[in-house]
């Protein structure tokens, strides 16, 4: 078994930016791109979604904070200054909620109830996708590749148009998928004959090898084979690699450094993602030589599970995880030396925290990398949230301070004394973190992101703690008063 060399400059190492949530202001790229270069990244996989300044009919899909044309150019120039190639990613089949949620595009949904996937048989679908793709290409004339998505097309072959098409052509659902991708690829080739076209691989995993070969998809695209699980759960089996090697001469692969565990993940489980890189290293060592070329890896950092879910780990929170993941790939494993290099490059006083759970855990001084204060505040917030859940399960709250007991003033202040001091301290700590994060987030993200993050991750705990403390204080006052005053207040 030969050792695959991820350190080689010929092996691309892309960092994925998922802008469907928490898009940073352009100034942040100026700070972070130079760091990514130092860590060994060679490029950026930029998934704009509704942050790209589409023109014409597509203008409706742009969100209020959308980047300007000048900002798109600025991002690319900043990347070029740091020797980072930019590969744009535009969805062309599934994960099109940002498009299909609008009434204007309702008719091209595959399933009327869901805005996830478009109908590949609708006469308008191809033109809408090509409008997006052509605008992206126009703004990325120096890009050698474009990624057109194609993953997790949950709804396929369900509408009447698709059913009629399958029946008329004696097709299965996989034929619909391959036909749509093929048509989009040929249209892109009319614009740019040289550009490499990447798609996610998952929709092809269960397609019969003969169907793949007869479609000639292997001559048209480069699959990006993604898998985000750790070593002991890695599920891409030998048969898949053998099938792909017989169809695709050149491939990409994709791991993850964040956004691949829980929808509501606040703190990145670093060891989990290191294990994912280690699993990929094993795959490359075993199967890499089966292909003419493994072009590179995209280390993905998902910001939402889909367009409608809450934010998961913010980029600055996960940047230390990204650092150790990149260096693990480059050095061939996670070692003590990798740990030290990553920690030094990011300005940690001690070593990067690898085992981030369970919480609470001690939090050291803020690291010096761009967004380091956000990283630390979220670790502190994670501690407080754990302490909150422990507090709310305190027997004196669950058994002696229920809403029924409060409503009927059937409370013994002896029980209040068991939890109120801790509740006051916890409330004070979360209020302080709220102030810290509001200020620090505003330096990197747009106000809408700051508002959402605080509303989801902090405000609910503040509201519940304030109510708990207020109710406890009122009960103390009530039960401290003479009996005749209690009856009067009742």
Image (cartoon, helix red, strand yellow):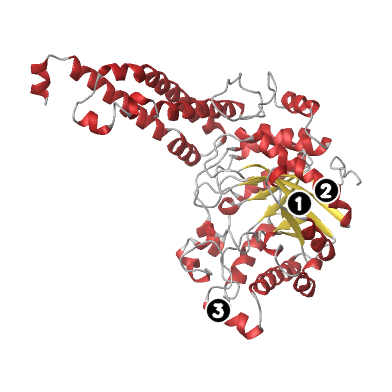
Please indicate, yes or no, whether residue 31 appears anywhere in the rendered image.
no
Camera-side residue: 488 or 123? 488
Circle 2/circle 1 CB separation < 8 Å: yes
- The answer to which quarter of the image holds residue 29 is top right
**Mark 2 highlights which residue?**
284
Q: 159 left or right of 48?
A: left
Camera-side residue: 51 or 420? 420
- The secondary element bearing badge 3 is classed as helix
Circle 3/circle 2 CB separation < 8 Å: no
- Residue at position x 69%, y 43% from top? 230
- Disc nearest the viewer among 2 and 1: 2
Q: Quadrant of the C terminus?
A: top left
Camera-side residue: 475 or 451? 475
Q: 420 left or right of 148?
A: left
Q: 405 left or right of 347?
A: left
- The secondary element bearing badge 1 is classed as strand
- Mark 1 vs mark 3: which is more N-terminal? 3
**Mark 1 highlights which residue?**
253
**Mark 3 highlights which residue?**
161
Q: Residues within 10 Å of mark 2 (few under 14, many from 20)?
A: some
Residue 366 in the image: state x and y as whole percent.
61, 22
Decide: is 271 above or below 400. below
């Amino acid at each position: 078994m030969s050792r695959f060399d991820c350190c080689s400059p010929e092996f691309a190492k892309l960092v994925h930016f998922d802008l469907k949530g928490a898009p940073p202001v352009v100034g942040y790229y100026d700070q972070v791109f130079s760091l990514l270069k130092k860590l060994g990244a060679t490029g950026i996989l930029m998934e704009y979604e509704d942050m790209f300044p589409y023109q014409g009919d597509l203008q409706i899909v742009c969100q209020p904070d959308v980047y300007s044309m000048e900002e798109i150019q600025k991002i690319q120039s900043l990347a070029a200054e740091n020797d980072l190639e930019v590969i744009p990613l535009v969805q062309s089949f599934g994960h099109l909620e940002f498009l299909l949620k609008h009434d204007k595009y309702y008719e091209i949904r595959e399933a009327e109830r869901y805005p996830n996937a478009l109908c590949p048989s609708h006469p308008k679908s191809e033109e809408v996708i090509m409008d997006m793709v052509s605008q992206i290409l126009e703004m990325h004339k120096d890009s050698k590749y474009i990624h057109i998505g194609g993953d997790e097309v949950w709804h396929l072959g369900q509408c009447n148009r698709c059913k009629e098409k399958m029946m008329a052509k004696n097709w299965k659902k996989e034929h619909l998928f391959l036909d749509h991708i093929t048509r989009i690829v040929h249209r892109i080739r009319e614009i740019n004959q040289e550009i490499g076209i990447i798609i996610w691989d998952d929709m092809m995993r269960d397609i019969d090898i003969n169907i793949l070969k007869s479609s000639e998809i292997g001559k048209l695209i480069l699959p990006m084979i993604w898998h985000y699980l750790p070593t002991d759960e890695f599920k891409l089996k030998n048969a898949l690699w053998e099938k792909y090697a017989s169809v695709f001469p050149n491939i990409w692969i994709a791991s993850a450094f964040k956004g691949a565990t829980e929808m509501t993940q606040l703190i990145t489980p670093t060891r989990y993602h290191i294990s994912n890189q280690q699993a990929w290293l094993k795959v490359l060592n075993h199967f890499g030589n089966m292909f003419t070329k493994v072009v590179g890896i995209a280390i993905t950092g998902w910001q939402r599970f889909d367009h409608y879910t809450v934010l998961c780990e913010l980029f600055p929170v996960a940047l230390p995880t990204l650092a150790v993941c990149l260096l693990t790939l480059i050095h061939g494993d996670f070692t003590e030396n990798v740990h030290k290099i990553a920690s030094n490059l990011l300005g940690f006083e001690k070593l990067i925290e690898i085992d981030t759970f369970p919480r609470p855990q001690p939090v050291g001084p803020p690291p010096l990398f761009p967004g380091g204060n956000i990283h630390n505040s979220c670790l502190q917030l994670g501690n407080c949230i754990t302490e909150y859940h422990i507090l709310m399960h305190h027997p004196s709250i669950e058994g002696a301070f229920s809403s029924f007991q409060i409503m009927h003033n059937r409370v013994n202040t002896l029980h209040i004394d068991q939890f109120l001091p801790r509740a006051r301290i916890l409330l004070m700590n979360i209020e302080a973190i709220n102030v810290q994060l509001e200020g620090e987030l505003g330096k990197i993200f747009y106000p809408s992101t700051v508002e959402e993050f605080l509303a989801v991750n902090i405000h609910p705990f503040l509201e519940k703690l304030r109510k708990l403390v207020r109710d406890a204080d009122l009960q103390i006052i009530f039960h401290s008063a003479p009996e005749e005053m209690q009856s009067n207040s009742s």
